Amino acid sequence: MIKKPVKIKLDTGLEARPVAQLVQLASQFECEIHVEVEQKEVNAKSIMGMMTLGLDTGEEIIISTDGEDEKEAMEKMEEYLSHNKVQ
């Protein structure tokens, strides 16, 4: 298991479109991926769960990955959140 704090640098924060893209990215991996903020933890592959977090630019979250491709998943999730533009 890898657990890492990541700062959101997307210009728009995690609104509907960026959340959908993040969930789509997370779903490409076999490992479990969770996002934690304050006392709330959700499955990063769940669009409804991710939307409930209401994350914004500048917030720091904890990403945890656990499974066969956890290292690659962590790198890609961090890379996506660290860019300042939605792709």
Image (cartoon, rainbow, N blue to C red):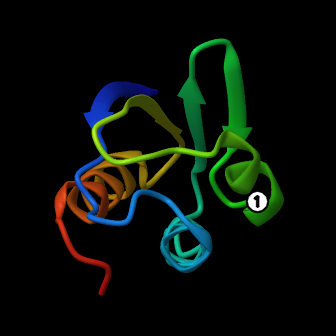
Q: Is residue 15 above or below residue 41?
A: below
Q: Which residue is disc 1 drawn over?
A: 46
Picture coordinates of residue 56, whole percent (x, y): 44, 46
Q: Is residue 65 above or below residue 84?
A: above
Q: Residues within 10 Å of mark 1 (few under 14, many from 20)?
A: some
Residue drawn at (28%, 61%) of the image: 10
Picture coordinates of residue 82, whole percent (x, y): 19, 55
The foreground one among 62 and 32 is 62
As drawn, the residue found furthest toward the top would be 39
Q: Is residue 54 left or right of residue 84?
A: right
Q: Is residue 63 left or right of residue 36?
A: left
Q: Is residue 78 above or below residue 45?
A: above
Placement of the C terminus among the 4 image quadrants = bottom left
Residue drawn at (48%, 73%) of the image: 18
Residue drawn at (63%, 52%) of the image: 44
Picture coordinates of residue 31, whole percent (x, y): 57, 52
Picture coordinates of residue 85, whole percent (x, y): 22, 75
Q: How many marks?
A: 1
The foreground one among 66 and 51 is 51
Q: Is residue 4 left or right of residue 48?
A: left
